[in-house]
Image (cartoon, grey):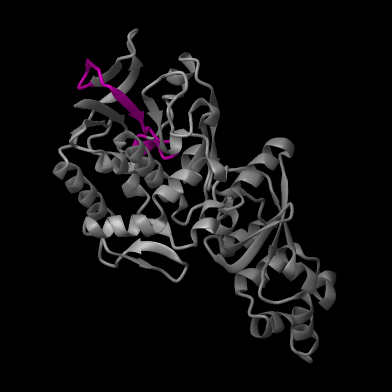
Amino acid sequence: MQTIAIIGGGPSALMLAAMLDEKKYSVHIYEKNAAVGRKFLVAGDGGFNLTHSEDLDSFIRRYTPSDFLEKALRTFTNQDLCEWLKEIGIETYVGSSKRIFPVKGIKPIEVLHAFIEKLKSRHVEIHTQHEWKGWTDQDKLVFITKGKEVVVSADKVVFALGGGSWKVTGSDGTWLNLFKEKGISIKPFQPSNCTYQVQWPKDFLEKHEGQWLKNISVVCKGEEKKGELVITAFGLEGGAIYALSPLLRKQLVTTGVVEITIDFKPTLTHEVVLQKMTRAGNKLITKILSDDIKLTDTHIALLKAVVSKEDFLNEDILASIIKNFPLAITGMSPIDDAISTVGGIVLTEVDKEFQLNKLPNHYVIGEMLDWDAPTGGYLLQGCFSMGARLAKVLNE
């Protein structure tokens, strides 16, 4: 029987361990925290979005680069995940946003406990408070546990150490230099799915911080994403802008500022918005915006804060601005505040089954690798699918 050492205890590691052939492998997870799944639990704070119900071809296109994860996502699909979760006692449902959650009443800790029970049933050994510190000269694994150095030898090694966000969970990216010293190409981490900086007018922010802009679309360089946004002291966050992260990040690095536009009413054409204004008779423009076009107080306040009085009273110009509201993005939030990161190990350093080209029998999965995905269940599904795909490969 071969020994597999899995370093890290996040979603990709847990799924891999749960699917490895217990008759073929002795499986050991090494986690530096006092328990596995700490970031997994933090991800459930705002509603535990496990995956998305989108059709698979569209689902795959959400990833950057999509071809890197396609085989894994087809091996273990969003539907496969739901069926597997059901097998371990976690029923799921599709929400109104088409995102998939555990049925109401099931808490994130219960999902994690179901994973752990599955691992126990498959005789996976979990070693907590084991912080990986690198390799010996013979490429054995070095850990620090309770102040002591421990050297571990394994037939196969899988790294699942996470990215660089939410350091409090242990996902701090300090492993980057260890791989760099091995001659493995890495990229510094950058924030993704984060708050984007906007210089709001002070008076507007004081009254509308924390308010949502729902059922809108955001356009950047011709690419459009529908969803919702929330106004923050720093700028904007929410699914509609998270989905543009690769493009926004690239433009910010290049130019330091990115121009976006927001369509406040993507279900209405410019002509329909204009008609609603011109047919409203002698009503005040603010009442027209509220009653006839169904803009919220936050939409209207944002228009008044940015648009000149002359343009605000010009129906044609105002209709155009409602459909193409301009904003300048001037930065990103700090990396530790981001939901996820990009960067890490360059994808050309691993083969098509996640094995490091320069270290045979050493594999890398999860957010350690330089791929990107929006929120909405895509991040977790990507990690689960990589774990499942690698398990299939190793079991063959």
At which x and y percent is residue 140?
A: 30, 15
> Residue placed at 74% from the left, 76% from the top?
269
What is the quadrant of residue 161 in the picture?
top left
> Residue placed at 52% from the left, 52% from the top?
60
Residue 333 visible here: no
Which residue occupies the foreground of this view, 260 or 376?
Answer: 376
Q: Give left or right: position of 136 versus 222.
A: left
Which quadrant holds the C terminus? Answer: top left
What is the quadrant of residue 214 in the picture?
bottom right
Which residue occupies the foreground of this view, 91 or 56?
Answer: 56
Above or below 36: residue 356: above
Residue 276 visible here: yes
Residue found at the far front of this picture? 396
Q: Give left or right: position of 89 versus 250.
A: left
At which x and y percent is residue 367?
A: 44, 38
Residue found at the far bottom of this picture? 281
> Residue placed at 42% from the left, 19% from the top?
359
Which residue occupies the foreground of this view, 96 or 26?
Answer: 26
At which x and y percent is residue 191?
A: 54, 40
Region in magenta = 145-170
Q: Is residue 133 magenta?
A: no
Q: Give left or right: position of 306 versus 198.
A: right
